[in-house]
């Protein structure tokens, strides 16, 4: 029996590893879904003397998009964000995460600005409260500030049309 024990342990570990490798890392469940968004207050990218807070995301369906100029996937999703912003369906707030303020401002000047306002999370503490694993990440909140959706990774036009816009329309209609 003792000589079969290592083989049994190896078999169990191999099965668990196989299951883990089959999981989609973009489908990490968020403990925030269905709960009020975390409170925050940060300086604005365009005006460091002014602030952005969780209160700015209440009252209408809002999107919080975590991004940084150092993030290659953020560049990949940028055009989809611009097109989403042009629909006017939801207010998009940027959370510029652990970035250089001047580089971030230049990025938005060069590529276009999909954000109604951008908060600067220079030390990353607010992102921790939101459970951010990496950039880009996108959250959708209803008008009461309840987190209803989280997407890890770059937004695409297909994802926006298939999931994001229908969800926003349902939230706006109260369904």
Image (cartoon, helix red, strand yellow):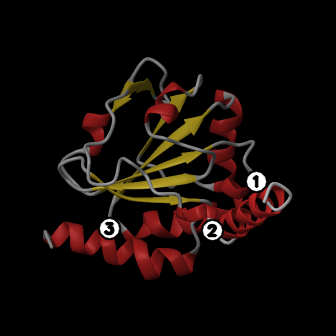
Residue 171's tag is: none
Q: Do the residues labelled 1 and 3 touch (CB within 8 Å)?
A: no
Answer above or below: position of 123 versus 6: above
**27 vs 82, nearest the viewer:** 27
| Secondary structure of the residue carrying numbered label 1 | helix
Q: Give the residue pinned by disc 3.
A: 89
Image quarter hosting the C terminus? bottom left
Instruction: Classify mark 3: residues with Cα within 10 Å, few (<14), some (14-19) or many (20+).
Output: some
Q: Which of marks 2 and 1 is nearer the N terminus?
A: 2
The residue wearing badge 1 is 72
Kind of element beneath mark 3 = loop
Residue 162 position within the rendered picture, expressed as x and y whole percent measured from the top left: 45, 82
Outermost residue, top side: 49
**Which sits in the foreground, 160 or 33?**
33
Q: Quadrant for residue 102, please give it.
A: top right
Residue marked by disc 2: 23
């Amino acid at each position: 029996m003792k000589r079969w024990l290592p083989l049994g342990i190896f078999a169990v570990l191999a099965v668990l590893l196989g299951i883990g490798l089959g999981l989609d890392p973009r489908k990490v469940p968020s403990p925030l879904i269905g709960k009020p968004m975390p409170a925050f207050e940060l300086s604005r990218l365009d005006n460091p003397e002014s602030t952005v807070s969780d209160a700015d995301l209440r009252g209408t369906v809002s999107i919080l998009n975590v991004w940084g100029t150092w993030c290659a996937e953020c560049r990949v999703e940028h055009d989809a964000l611009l097109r989403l912003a042009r629909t006017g369906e939801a207010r998009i707030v940027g959370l510029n995460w652990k970035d250089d303020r001047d580089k971030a401002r230049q990025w938005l000047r060069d590529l276009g600005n999909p954000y109604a306002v951008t908060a600067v999370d220079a030390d990353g503490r607010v992102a921790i409260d939101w459970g951010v694993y990496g950039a880009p990440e996108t959250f959708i909140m209803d008008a009461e500030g309840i987190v209803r959706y989280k997407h890890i990774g770059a937004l695409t036009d297909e994802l926006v049309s298939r999931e994001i816009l229908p969800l926003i329309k349902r939230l706006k209609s109260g369904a």
